[in-house]
Amino acid sequence: MDHYIPITRKYRPQKFSSVLGQEAVIQVLINSLSKDRVGYAYLFSGIRGTGKTTLARIFAKALNCHSPTPEGEPCNNCPSCLEITSGSSLDVIEIDGASNRGIDDIRQITESAAYAPSSGRFKIYIIDEVHMLTKEAFNALLKTLEEPPATVKFFFATTEPQKVPPTILSRCQRFPLKPLQSEQITQKLAQICDAYGVPVEEEALPLISHLSSGSVRDAESLLEKMLLFTDTTLTKQNIIDVLGIPSQEDFTAFDKALNENDLTFPFRFSEKLQSQGKEPKPFITGLTEHLRLALRANLNTPKKDYYIRALDYLIEALSSQTISYIHLEVLLLKLLRQQKRLQPETLVDRLEQLEKNLRTAPQQEIAPPPKPAPAPAPKAPTPQKVKAPQPIVEIPQPMVEASLPFAETPMPKAEAPPAPKPTPPPKTETTQQAGANYDTLLRFAGVELNGSVNKEFKE
Ligand SMILES: Nc1ncnc2c1ncn2[C@@H]1O[C@H](COP(=O)(O)OP(=O)(O)O)[C@@H](O)[C@H]1O
Ligand SMILES: [Mg+2]
Ligand SMILES: [Zn+2]
């Protein structure tokens, strides 16, 4: 019986010239081989499925190949090439940084690096998702990177180079890989369909490429899924039916939910997709484009802040390989809630207005707050807090609102000093004291919101 091999493995390029879209990087790698100036540490970065692991393996093969071609390609025939292709080479060791993150895992590597390669010229460690290593593991690795044995090479791959410590980065040659153009992906998909003998409608493959946002692996996985569903010609309609290409109606429904702050929408929409057996990811991809257009149309309106934050969430969601239905629901809830969030600028404007009103108010008594606070004030800010702000996790909307008409919570400063003689009017604040309270509140709010906004953008 035939052993089934998924498309992504079956069609993994085995030589440089089959890797699409990374010409500049490949040229540098081949030059370093031909000039015999190969460094000892390389870092390939880029979104998933753009060729990081593939290039690391081809480069490893070319380095250890017994008879490379004049163009610098590995021969793919010598024992070393064959072993590397089958994953049985003792000299090319692949480690998944996500599941071998600890210092002991890295120690094993650095200890074994001291031994000579078994049959090839070099011992090559390919560490995937290297950003996942712990701080201690990076430190252990750094020692070896500082004085690597002459026969050892490290090839790192990561989707998040910004999480790799600068000390490591500075010892690597860095190769950022580009997301692929739709046309390049379509070209590869067409070759695969050809090889499978599956006829395709002209518009079908570009649609798959478009849905993959630059990742060849994603495109190949989608094609694989489609081939399971189609016996005859692969059509655009097949893809829409199986993968669930979102329609304009879906986006309109989202906009409506946003306007009405309808928090049931995420659940209803997710149930609809599930009942139709459709994947969440194409909708997220489409929604990103939809909100991007909305942002462009709103660049000069206050709404732009909302769209920027929403796109931030969407782009982060798209960076994961798959999106589950629950992931979709939570994401949509976040997008809807964001809209109702009070903007820092709005809050500061409102506070400034209050302050102004106070200054122009009659001298004796403080005017009643513009809006009474709901009963349990969740958190009464103290003066220390203003001076040394803690990063605030998240300010729920009602809390921000509740804090606004703050005058009901007396500030320590506002308490009347023990008066020597008669009776001071017990609960009356002077306009000046009240103004000071509002000043404090203004700063407090600024700090709080800043913290929460910064955090959101960092996440
Ligand atoms: N640049 C590319 N050209 C051709 N195929 C690619 C390219 N990048 C990825 N692929 C396809 O996607 C699969 C996964 O690629 P891989 O190199 O493992 O991606 P990653 O960047 O996530 O390490 C490969 O087996 C190959 O089929
Ligand atoms: Mg990889
Ligand atoms: Zn070879």
Image (tube, rainbow, N blue to C red):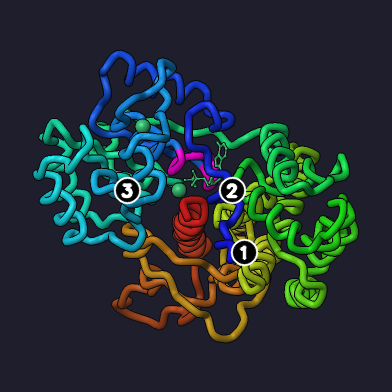
Q: Mark 1 points at which residue?
A: 323
Question: Which of 269/400 is in front?
Answer: 269
Relative to residue 291, is residue 116 depicted above or below?
above
Overall secondary structure of the magenta section: loop
Q: How far apart are marks 3 and 1 (CA)?
A: 25 Å
Query: Looking at mark 2, is its residue's CB closer than 8 Å to ligand 1?
Result: yes
Give the amino acid at mark 1: Ile
Residue 301 in the image: x percent, y percent?
Answer: 76, 42
Q: Mark 3 points at which residue?
A: 127
Q: What element carries label 1?
A: loop
Relative to residue 231, is residue 79 depicted above or below?
above
Residue 459 in the image: x percent, y percent?
Answer: 48, 55
Q: Name the residue under label 2.
A: 217
Marks 3/1 in contact by CB < 8 Å: the verdict is no
Residue 199 in the image: x percent, y percent?
Answer: 84, 46
Residue 59 seen anywhere in this rendered image of the structure: yes
In primary-sequence order, the first of circles 2 and 1 is: 2
- Residue 280 falls in image quadrant: bottom right
Q: Nearer the viewer, mark 2 or mark 1?
A: 2
Image point (79%, 49%), residue name? 198
> Residue 67's mark?
none
Horizontal side of residue 186 vs 136, given as left or right: right
In primary-sequence order, the first of circles 3 and 1 is: 3
Give the amino acid at mark 2: Arg
Task: Give neighbour class at mark 3: few <14, some 14-19, many 20+ (Cα, 10 Å).
Answer: many
Give the amino acid at mark 3: Ile
The N terminus: image quadrant:
bottom right
Question: Which of 256/357 is in front?
Answer: 256
Magenta span includes 52: yes
* Numbered range of the magenta stretch: 47-54
Residue 433 in the image: x percent, y percent?
Answer: 46, 63
Q: What element carries label 2?
A: helix
